[in-house]
Amino acid sequence: ELGGTVQEAPMASGHQSQNTVRVLVRARPLLAAEAARGQTEVVECPDAKTVCVTLPSNVQGQGVVRTFDFGMACGSELHQAAVYEHSGAAQFAEMALEGFPATILAYGSTGSGKTYTMSGLDQRDGGGGAVAPAADAGAHDGIIPRTCQQLWSSMATAERKYGRKHTVLATYCEVYNEQVFDLLNLTGKPLAVRHQPASDEFYVCGALEVQCESLDDVMAVIAEGHLNRRRASHDLNQDSSRSHSLLTLQIMIDDAQVQPNEPASSTAPRKRGKLTFVDLAGSERLKRSRTSSAEETGAINKSLFTLAKVISVLSDMALQHDSADQRQHHVPYRDSTLTKLLADALGGNALALFIACVSPALAQADETTNTLSYALRAQSIRNRPRINITGGDPAGKQSSMESELTFLRQEVLRLRTQAAMVHPLQEEVAILTRQLQECRAANRAADGAAGVGPSGSESGDPIDPLAGGRKRQQPREAVSQKGVVHVGRPPPGIAGRETRTLKDKLRRTETALAASQARETAARRMIEQLKEAGVANEVPAAIIPGSAMELAYGSPPRARSPLSHRNPNQEEYSHSRLPGI
């Protein structure tokens, strides 16, 4: 998406608490396979905000208990419905309908129950479960399906009461080996991740968008994406996700029908909410998981390590919020594809819910403490939630997206016009190079006819030992200025001037050529961006001769070079007259 500038809006009362990342810790029950191997539970939640981890015994035989305090903590006895209620995900759905971006993210080691917490589809499909079966078929629904149900219920209420219209577009992607792939359009080709300067956001370019008109539509999208996600089996998890998945729901809220007496306008203000559900792949150690692909494990751990660095830096910035040292911090969002896509949720303009899933098994105690430590730092991160508003120009101008596309079209036309000098300048470089070579060849021929060597001395000159063994050049005879024929190379004042003039022309022409080629490259990149937006055919047809854009837009008649057919004795062509040089 190219357009859609973000206009900051004041937060309503009661939303001030959303400025920090909300953290929920969930401990799953001990699996039957873990109990059979003699594993014991080391994680417990004595209350709704405290998590205690009993580490292995020390030298004195005493266990070490570490206590972590969070905003919300769910023990292994809580089922999916209770976890959803404690998480506050329903409030995130309501905030998205007000135009806020919101992100719900599940983090933890492999086999800690992230996918079950987010979607619950593993148990619905018959996989092994940590929660006892229930008679209700929807008892195992995770946060994603329950939040979508709340979203559609709230949209129906708003349409019935206020006549508000909603348009929901869904995309489902995965980050695998630091590349983004579409889970709804299995082309096998990675998608580009680009940066939108207007809103300072990273976005996935070219992902298939599905318009969801009902709850069944979005549930079908979720099922299709989950089915296509990369999974594998290893010693720590029989159904391990090998990629990070991102389900995004773009919600366009149209309030034009609120006042039926006023005519609907295409430039009326529209809120644009967004719900993003992120199910991260679990961190793991290769010697313990014994997975068959070390590359997958390395890519997963790299992205999670970068995410941990981002959390640490943002946490330090929050602790130094009132200090001048805050400006010296660098947040490494660009070090990983995952952190680029999560930049808005971590320290950005979105509401964020961080769900830390932990395993209670003793063998995973070190991974559990690491997860809780990063979750503890994450809850101190400060975001700046703001409403996304598109349109609403009081002067009746184009919408923000149309303005952005118009600017890009004009920029492409400007770059094409300036880059159109690439071919003429290439011809000029060839002409000047040939003239310089002919001038040098003529000088060498004149030196040979007069018996003068390459160093400018005659062949019979004596060797000067003080000159490093080179021949000592004899002084030239005085040359009359009244038309006397010169012997050998012309005097330096004539031959050198012509050579220096050609060299200067060649250097300026090569500089102008490099500048035009740079503009051609910039125009080509912008054309690719417009192609991805589906508006490339609307770009003005000013073609750069001899470039790849000729093949895409047709081959017009080639313009004659203004430099290649002029007399060299005429006034020198000034490249500074070209636009932008």
Image (spheres, helix red, strand yellow):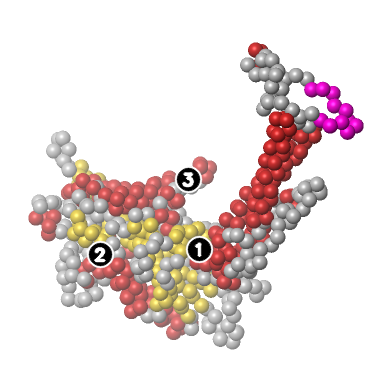
Q: CA distance from mark 2 to mark 1?
A: 31 Å
Look at the image and give the residue range highlighted in magenta.
Answer: 476-486
The prevailing secondary structure element of the residues shown in magenta is loop
Is residue 482 highlighted in magenta?
A: yes
| Residue count near mark 1 (Cα–Cα under 10 Å), binned few <14, some 14–19, many ≥20 | some
Q: From the viewer's perspective, is the residue at label 3 or at label 1 nearer?
A: 3
Task: Give the alpha-carbon distance from disc 2 to disc 3, as whole Å.
Answer: 35 Å
| Element marked by disc 3 | loop
Is 227 contained in the magenta span? no
What's the amino acid at mark 1? Arg
The kind of residue on which mark 2 rests is Tyr
User: Residue at the spot x=70%, y=30% of the render?
Assistant: 448
Nearest the viewer among 526 and 569 is: 569
Q: Is residue 496 left or right of residue 342?
A: right
Coordinates of residue 112 in the picture (x, y in percent): 24, 57
Residue 345 figure quarter: bottom left
Residue pictured at 22% horizontal, 52% vertical: 292
Camera sees residue 342: yes
Q: Secondary structure at mark 2?
A: helix
Q: Observer-nearest residue: 430 or 175?
A: 430
Q: Is residue 73 visible?
A: no
Instruction: Name the residue tied to disc 1.
Output: 386
Mark on residue 566? none
The amino acid type of the residue labelled 3 equals His
